[in-house]
Image: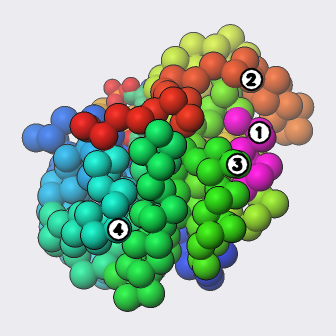
Amino acid sequence: MSIPTVTLNNGVEIPQLGLGTYKLPPQDTRDLVLRAFDAGYRHLDTAQMYRNERAVGEAVAAAGLPREEVFVTTKLNNAFHAHDDALAAFDRSLEELGLDFVDLFLIHWPLPAVGLYTEAWAALEEIYASGRARAIGVSNFQPHHLRRVLDEGTVVPAVNQVEVHPWFANEEVRAFDAAHGIVTEAWSPLGRGAVLADPTVARIAAAHGRSPAQVVLRWHVQRGDVVFPKSATPERVVENARIFDFELSAEDMAAVTALDRGERTGSHPDEENRTDR
Ligand SMILES: NC(=O)c1ccc[n+]([C@@H]2O[C@H](COP(=O)([O-])OP(=O)(O)OC[C@H]3O[C@@H](n4cnc5c(N)ncnc54)[C@H](OP(=O)(O)O)[C@@H]3O)[C@@H](O)[C@H]2O)c1
């Protein structure tokens, strides 16, 4: 199964579907990632906060794929927004992953009460200039956080990774991203599994002979977002990649979009200020 790519604002191509690795059981991470590679995945989403960069890197090494065929994202943890801390944390990520460069490095949360995200962004710009991250971006940034990055920085973030799923369409942030050439990455694309029981999703899935997860992931990709569902179940990892051989109609798309009820599974970015994770 070949997975299409989306072109970032610096020309780098990112596979539109990847594997989320948050809370993958540590002892199974390597095997699950290898299974994902077998199923056609070439994009892995990890983070310093997930404490699994080493296992992810071991799987990349074990797969033996050419480095340029694998897209690896990691994210700066919340305690390291000060400039020198961010540089040192990035070095540790490369060491844990066993890589010379990552494809995408993100600020995980803006932490407005800490107030250092533009300082962290300056550090990411230096990392980008050094060539050790092929692209840099942010995660969980609201438009007013992005506005400061755009005003005070010199590099436009390539992506903004935010919560998006049928119960939380996050349209305002997606529209701001699109207006500024920033690709939206949809985290928790399955609403952590909860939206799969929605009757509208189930009805559309039955009509297409697909699973609810495939319908929800297909809805995301037809909206143009990048997704990386997480599953610790090998069969589901395979199932989640089989979404490029069918299409939702305009009516199907509208019906799923209409499920938006503003329901987050995670923190509001203005309220998340924890630096101890
Ligand atoms: N930047 C951020 O702040 C942030 C925050 C959250 C997540 N993320 C990223 O986004 C990724 C995905 O988000 P997520 O892990 O929170 O949630 P998710 O991918 O929306 O949902 C994962 C849940 O759905 C279940 N699932 C997966 N595929 C399924 C299928 N085909 N059928 C039925 N159930 C299925 C999984 O169960 P099993 O595992 O038991 O199969 C798991 O319980 C993360 O792993 C991480 O990489 C980023």
Q: Which residue is mark 4?
A: 83
Q: Secondary structure at mark 3?
A: helix
- Using the image, determine if residue 164 lies above or below residue 225: above
Distance, label 3 to label 4, CA atoms, is 23 Å
- Going by the numbered disc 1, the residue's amino acid type is Glu
Ranked by sequence position, the earlier of labels 1 and 4 is: 4
Ranked by sequence position, the earlier of labels 3 and 1 is: 3
Ranked by sequence position, the earlier of labels 3 and 2 is: 3
Residue at coordinates 24% horizontally, 81% vertically from top-left? 100
Q: Quadrant of the C terminus?
A: top left
Q: Which residue is mark 1?
A: 171
Q: Are marks 2 and 1 in contact (CB under 8 Å)?
A: yes
Most extreme residue toward the bottom is 130
- Going by the numbered disc 2, the residue's amino acid type is Asp
Q: Are marks 3 and 2 in contact (CB under 8 Å)?
A: no
Q: Which residue is mark 3?
A: 143
First to last magenta residue range:
170-177
- At which x and y percent is residue 99? 22, 75
- At which x and y percent is residue 225? 66, 52
Within 10 Å of disc 1 (Cα), the crowding (few <14, some 14-19, many 20+) is: few
- At which x and y percent is residue 114? 42, 45
- Left or right of 213: which side holds 229? left
Is ligand 1 less than 8 Å from the beta carbon at label 3? no
- Going by the numbered disc 3, the residue's amino acid type is Pro
Distance, label 1 to label 4, CA atoms, is 32 Å
